[in-house]
């Protein structure tokens, strides 16, 4: 995928800047208790690829 195409997709995505903080908090809620988030978000988060390095850490704890 070309860099400009990727940028266009990210800019139009629900993952764009305006939603970033909300989605990060939702993901932290998911990491704490997966059942606390809507089933659609839970499915989305469960499909995210892992890094293989260590379990995800909350941004608020870094």
Image (tube, rainbow, N blue to C red):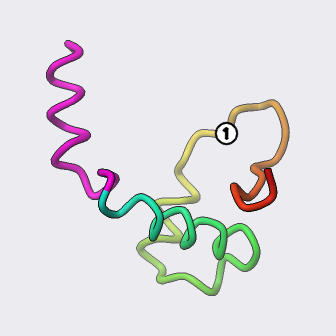
Decide which of 50, 29 is in the foreground and name it.
29
Asked if residue 6 lies left or right of residue 60, the reply is left
Farthest residue, direction bottom = 36
Q: Position of residue 35 (x, y in %)?
A: 64, 84
In the image, residue 38 sits, relative to residue 18, either above or below, namely below
Residue carrying label 1? 50
Q: Position of residue 12 (x, y in %)?
A: 16, 48
Q: Mark 1 Cα within 10 Å, few/some/many (few <14, many 20+)?
A: few
Q: Is residue 15 magenta?
A: yes
Q: Is residue 4 magenta?
A: yes
Residue drawn at 67 percent across, 76 percent down? 34
In the image, residue 36 sits, relative to residue 50, either above or below, namely below
Q: Which stretch appears magenta?
A: 1-17
Q: Position of residue 56 (x, y in %)?
A: 75, 49
Decide which of 36, 57 is in the foreground and name it.
57
Asked if residue 51 lies left or right of residue 15, the reply is right
Q: Quadrant of residue 10?
A: top left
Q: Position of residue 2 (x, y in %)?
A: 20, 13
Farthest residue, direction right = 54
Secondary structure at badge 1 equals loop
Asked if residue 9 lies left or right of residue 42, the reply is left
Residue drawn at 19 percent across, 37 percent down? 9
């Amino acid at each position: 995928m070309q860099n400009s195409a990727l940028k266009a997709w990210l800019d139009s995505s629900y993952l764009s800047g305006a939603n970033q903080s909300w989605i990060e908090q939702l993901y932290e809620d998911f990491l704490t208790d997966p059942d606390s988030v809507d089933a659609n978000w839970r499915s989305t988060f469960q499909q995210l690829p892992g890094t293989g390095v260590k379990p995800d850490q909350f941004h608020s704890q870094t």
